[in-house]
Amino acid sequence: MKERLYEILNEGKVHEIIPFLKELTTEERKALVPAIKKMDREISKIIMTKNSYHTAGSVNQHSIIDIASLACMDQKNFGKNYWSLFRNREKAEQILEWGCPDWFSDFINDSIDAEFTAFNYHDILRWAEKGYVQPKPELLGHHLSNYPADLELHPETLKTHFWYLCEYPSKSLPFRKEWFPIIQKLSAEKKLTEKDF
């Protein structure tokens, strides 16, 4: 089992990781966690060159580890790896479709304090629609703060989520000068009314 995972990783065969993981039982996937952590440390080592630096692993190798981690680890072992989640969006979405981890919703809700995430407000809405995440109001307000131009794309955004943004302002909100003219425009168009307050 570990040997097969090493083979997939060493050859960078991203297309083979999900079929391999699907063949395993829950117990077998859990048993791979120490090996996944070891492989992650190996490919994450920094290689210095004359003018730059990079990790020892290729893009495909990092994707393989990200996908295996999501499929095999519990939330404690996965940690707060918000930035690498969905680095390979297509494969990660396949993992969620096949078997969304039971900790995924809590993990996403806890991302409010993350410095950076590889997912956004639109991802959260899509995951909520599919039942992967039960987003907290703070989460929706926080992530919406980065998308001022998208207030009218989804019916719930202007009706409900905008008010979460007001109630739970994001640390990035003061840096988005687009908000003032957008709110003025929506108010002038009577899309923000007193009954909403």
Image: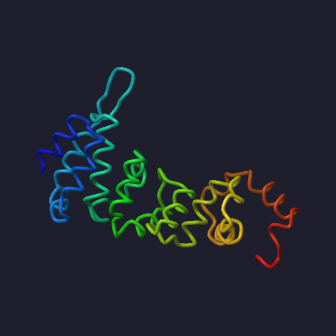
Tally of numbered discs: 0
Residue 50 image point, x, y percent: 35, 20
184 or 92, which lies in front? 92
Q: Say which quadrant the C terminus sits in.
A: bottom right
Which image quadrant for residue 158?
Answer: bottom right
Which quadrant would residue 103 be assigned to in this image? bottom left
Drawn side of residue 126 relative to residue 9, left or right: right
Q: Position of residue 89 (x, y in %)?
A: 43, 48
Q: Which residue lies at the image location 61% right of the left edge and 55% below the top edge?
A: 172
Q: Position of residue 124 (x, y in %)?
A: 52, 61
The residue positioned farthest toward the bottom in the image shown: 195
Residue 165 is left or right of residue 77, and the answer is right
Q: What residue appears at the point 25 percent right and 50 percent down from the top-left corner? A: 19
- Residue that appears at 39% across and 49% down: 84
Residue toward you, 111 or 102? 102
- When the figure is inspected, residue 12 is found, relative to residue 192, above or below; the finding is above
Q: Outermost residue, right direction?
A: 188
